[in-house]
Image (cartoon, rainbow, N blue to C red):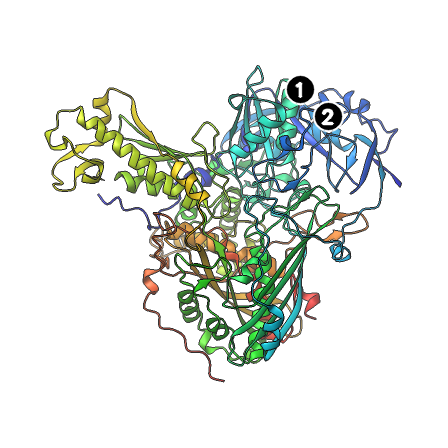
């Protein structure tokens, strides 16, 4: 029996549950005697509530309560109680806390009733009066008030300049300077945010939450409501898409818990699709890039400056410009990043936060620079290849971006490209070929994992991480099965529960590396525990044997020196007289490692090649072919990994061509707050997408050599589309999305 | 300062009509429930019958996550009141197959990795089943177009297309049962190590 599962295209182990509808998401736990809460949202963007007349609504039979700032107790007073794990600096929004309105669609009341239908109806007739004051939602009018944020959010470093950009600019013989912009974008996972709180009596709650981090939801609930952890168990077995939206707990969690505690009943609160536009989003960002090159095509100066929106109450920061200081070799780099406060909700990490935005500006500017320098865009990038991370002044743990360029270009047929815009045709259609790429952090965080082998020989491995669609259930099962030499059917991976060992938020492309390596550690510990048990058994061959002397295969523990000397794992557990033998990894070393300065720059890279066909009369754009070559270390499961990159490409196409939350500045509200009007790619928009994983072995990044894949595939995609459109039409559009009106 | 009023004052909420019994024929079984007449088929399934395989993504007929089959045709269950479907044959994802006995489409979705988070998946499968029932989708272009009412935010469209095509091709006369998915080139690195560097175009 071959139990080498790592690197194999195993089908998702949660597939059968997902295709038959038995996988339960947060709003699908139908607990007995449950009430329904429906959120009433503010029609104004700034001002205050002056009156709420709940009496007529409360008179409706079946309406249990109308919660608002008028009757919700102040469970907590200090900002720190409202700060979740990744809260940026500032004062977090507190739902139903006071009369002040800070953003459009702010929750102002929660109507709780016996049925969903009644709660929705009652919410629609709840009478509320407001005094509205002038709001500010135009980023372009606040560039002058923009300020440099401090460190704030964990992990954010203000960008560092180096050398002397002014000198580099003067040394250059060819120059490009341009401004770029994109509007706010909303994550819009298919599942709306929802929380089902099951009241178990005496303030004991089971909280089924849509989140990317059950522990983060629990942290916030315990801090605000003063509950002990054992009274606030958060469960999240399946999450219907995250993309960053679930990194911070959303307000429906707090409303559902509040209502449950106040009414001593089980309560469900689901947000509507419109309300999915009432919280975090990718911030609108304005960017300025200036590049200069010498006669040989080498970059002599890079200047990248960005201004992004944040709310009035928190400083949301992301790394927009930092990547421009490391992707290409250049001595003189000037970087700047500022925030401007607007009357909107605080932005939130959205797939490849910062990098997706920054790579649009950098990679379009690189294309413009290539043309200005008279070089092919790929050749131009090769000439400025960086073999050393100049931003951190560290060597790379590995960097196979050159392979991405070579293999991606070969697969795409880039050689056939003729440089002049409008020079390639398919019949009447204009053909454009463009490219781009990017870089993303390879991060590993401490994660706790328990491995438990029962007397039937079944291995259960558990960790409180999340499954947002990335394949966590599957890859962890593969790693555990291979580690213990068991068939994959004999292994179950359990996640999404605060009663399990603690795991970090599911985000940042770090779950595979963080939890995956910990699975190996836990399985090693389990192996040691099993070996220890053999010492109590009558097996002379195993006496005094060390863990390094054995291997696990075929459901057995074998001596490496003599594989005929084997113990069946199930028998070892049975001999112990216990129902199971289990072990947990230690996160101590991982925590210590985080305190030390890194020795290597650890990053994943990609290069993406895009073909567009543009109708010269109507200027409709079709992306007909994409090749995305990714260097992300070891690929645990090429099937689910490919899907990650396919999805990233779809996201990049959406960013390039359709996604924008359009602010109506008269009302301070996103006017296209529905899936009919917030356009995302549909099946008919997607044509051939090829994914290439280049070989990249890395023994420094982490023991399994994993770099993470959730985000890197999105980088440079939008820019490559813009560059391909330029190549097809000669029109350089620097304001995303590139809708038809910008091409006509 | 401007005075803004949400829901006009003075109009007391309309008196609600009582709930009424509604009998639905779902997945081969009659189920009677007592609901307000404006309860959507979607909410009836999810909130009253615990058939939560049918998903709510927008509640406005814009995303397709709530697709079910009514008399074999695929509809958005959020755009239909439950009471309108009395007497109809309703089939939800739970009625198409079980984990032990998957339908051909369910199996193809797993084989082709045609989903990630899984939330749009039941709707995708019901839409595809509806297209097949109706004999509408025959070519890749048709499937792409006709499946475009089902959003997938994870972006699994390419794999959804190949899963649906496999089942359609497998059902054509002459096809020997279910076509096994060809061994995909998963491009996991090793296959591409021999690629030569590309030469820059000559100016």
* Residue A403 drawn above or below residue A523: below
**Residue at the limit of the structure toward the top, as seen here:** A202
From the top left corner, tell me how far across and down residue A559 is, in percent.
Answer: 15, 38
* Left/right of residue B60 with respect to residue B164 in the rendered view: right
Q: Residue A316 vs residue B167: left or right?
A: right
Dividing the image into 4 quarters, which one contains the N terminus of chain A? top left
Element marked by disc 2: strand
Q: Which mark is residue A262?
A: 1
Give the chain letter at badge 1: A
Q: Position of residue A454 (x, y in %)?
A: 29, 27
Neighbours of disc 1 within 10 Å: few (<14), some (14-19), many (20+) = some
Tell me which residue sits at (67%, 22%) in the image: A114
Which is nearer the eye, A377 or B165? A377
Q: Which residue is mark 2?
A: A67
Labelled pair 1, 2 in contact (Cβ < 8 Å): yes
Given residues A96 and B60, the one toward you in this image is A96
- Where's residue A313, x and y in %? 71, 41
């Amino acid at each position: 029996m071959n139990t080498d599962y790592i690197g194999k295209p195993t089908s998702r182990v949660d597939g059968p549950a997902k295709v038959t509808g038995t996988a339960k998401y947060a709003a699908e736990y139908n607990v007995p005697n449950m009430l329904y809460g429906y959120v009433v949202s503010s029609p104004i963007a700034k001002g205050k509530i002056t009156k709420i007349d709940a009496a007529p609504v409360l008179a409706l039979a079946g309406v249990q309560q109308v919660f608002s700032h008028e009757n919700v107790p102040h469970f907590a007073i200090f900002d720190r109680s409202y700060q979740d794990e990744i809260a940026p600096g500032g004062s977090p929004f507190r739902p139903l806390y006071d009369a002040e309105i800070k953003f459009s669609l702010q929750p102002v009341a929660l109507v709780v009733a016996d049925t969903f239908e009644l709660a929705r109806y009652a919410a629609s007739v709840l009478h509320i009066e407001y005094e509205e004051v002038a709001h500010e939602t135009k980023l372009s009018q606040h560039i002058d008030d923009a300020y440099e944020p401090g460190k704030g959010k964990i992990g954010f470093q203000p960008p560092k300049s180096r050398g002397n950009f002014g000198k580099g600019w003067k040394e250059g013989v060819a120059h490009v300077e341009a401004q770029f912009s994109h509007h706010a974008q909303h994550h819009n996972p298919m599942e709306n945010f929802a929380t089902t709180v099951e009241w178990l009596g005496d303030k004991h709650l089971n909280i089924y939450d849509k989140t990317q981090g059950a522990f983060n939801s629990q942290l916030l609930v315990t801090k605000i409501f003063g509950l002990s952890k054992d009274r606030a168990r958060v469960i999240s077995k399946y999450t219907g898409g995250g993309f960053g939206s679930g990194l911070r707990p959303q307000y429906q969690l707090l409303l559902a818990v509040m209502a449950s505690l106040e009414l001593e009943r089980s309560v469900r609160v689901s947000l509507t699709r419109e309300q999915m536009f009432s919280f975090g989003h990718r911030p609108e960002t304005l960017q300025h890039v200036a590049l200069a090159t010498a006669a040989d095509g080498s970059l002599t100066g890079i200047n990248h400056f960005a201004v992004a929106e944040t709310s009035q109450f928190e400083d949301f920061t992301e790394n927009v410009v930092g990547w421009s200081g490391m992707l290409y070799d250049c001595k003189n780099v000037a970087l700047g990043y500022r925030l401007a406060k607007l009357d909107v909700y605080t932005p939130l990490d959205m797939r490849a936060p910062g990098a997706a935005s920054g790579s649009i500006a950098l990679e379009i500017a690189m294309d413009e620079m290539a043309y200005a320098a008279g070089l092919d865009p790929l050749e131009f990038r090769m000439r400025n290849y960086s073999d050393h991370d100049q931003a951190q002044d560290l060597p790379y743990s590995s960097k196979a971006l050159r392979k991405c360029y070579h293999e991606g270009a070969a697969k795409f047929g880039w050689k056939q490209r003729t440089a002049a815009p409008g020079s390639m045709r398919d019949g009447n259609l204009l053909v454009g070929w463009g490219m781009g790429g990017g870089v993303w952090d390879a991060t590993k965080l401490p994660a706790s994992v328990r491995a438990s082998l029962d007397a039937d020989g079944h291995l259960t491995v558990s960790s409180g991480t999340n499954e947002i669609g990335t394949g966590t259930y599957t890859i962890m099962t593969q790693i555990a099965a291979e580690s213990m030499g068991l068939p994959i059917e004999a292994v179950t991976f359990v996640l999404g529960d605060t009663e399990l060992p603690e795991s970090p938020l599911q985000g940042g492309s770090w779950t595979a590396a963080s939890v995956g390596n910990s699975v190996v550690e836990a399985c090693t510990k389990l192996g040691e525990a099993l070996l220890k048990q053999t010492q109590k058994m009558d097996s002379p061959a195993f006496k005094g044997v060390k863990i390094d002397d054995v291997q696990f295969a075929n459901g057995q523990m074998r001596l490496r020196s003599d594989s005929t000397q084997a113990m069946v794992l199930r028998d070892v557990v049975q001999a112990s007289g216990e129902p199971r033998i289990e072990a947990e990894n230690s996160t101590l070393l991982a925590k210590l490692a985080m305190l030390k300065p890194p020795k290597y720059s650890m990053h994943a890279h990609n290069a993406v090649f895009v073909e567009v066909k543009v109708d010269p009369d109507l200027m409709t754009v079709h992306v007909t072919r994409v090749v995305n070559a990714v260097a992300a270390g070891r690929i645990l499961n090429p099937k689910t990994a490919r899907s990650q990159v396919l999805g990233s490409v779809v996201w990049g196409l959406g960013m390039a061509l359709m996604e924008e939350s359009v602010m109506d500045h008269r009302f301070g509200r996103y006017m296209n707050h529905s899936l009919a009007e917030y356009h995302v790619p549909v099946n008919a928009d997607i044509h051939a997408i090829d994914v290439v994983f280049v070989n990249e072995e890395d023994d420094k990044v982490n023991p399994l050599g994993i770099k993470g894949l959730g985000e890197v595939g999105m980088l440079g995609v939008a820019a490559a589309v813009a560059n391909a459109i330029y190549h097809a039409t000669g029109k350089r559009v620097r304001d995303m999305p590139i809708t038809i009106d910008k091409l006509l | 300062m401007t005075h803004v009023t949400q829901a006009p004052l003075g109009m007391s909420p309309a008196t609600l009509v009582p709930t009424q019994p509604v009998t639905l024929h779902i997945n081969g079984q009659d189920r009677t429930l007592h609901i307000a007449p404006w309860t959507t088929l979607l909410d009836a399934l999810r909130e009253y019958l615990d058939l939560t395989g049918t998903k709510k993504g927008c509640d406005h007929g814009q995303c397709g996550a709530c697709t079910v089959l009514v008399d074999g045709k695929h509809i958005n269950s959020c755009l239909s009141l439950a009471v309108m479907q009395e007497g109809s044959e309703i089939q939800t994802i739970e009625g198409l197959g079980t984990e032990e006995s998957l339908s051909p489409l369910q199996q193809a979705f797993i084989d082709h990795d045609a989903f990630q988070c899984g939330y749009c998946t039941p709707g995708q499968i019901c839409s595809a089943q509806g297209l097949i029932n109706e004999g509408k989708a025959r070519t890749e272009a048709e499937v792409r177009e006709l499946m475009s009412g089902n959003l997938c935010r994870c972006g699994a469209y390419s794999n959804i297309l190949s899963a649906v095509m496999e089942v359609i091709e497998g059902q054509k006369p002459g096809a020997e049962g279910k076509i096994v998915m060809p061994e995909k080139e998963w491009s996991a690195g090793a296959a591409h190590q021999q690629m030569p560097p590309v030469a820059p175009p000559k100016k």
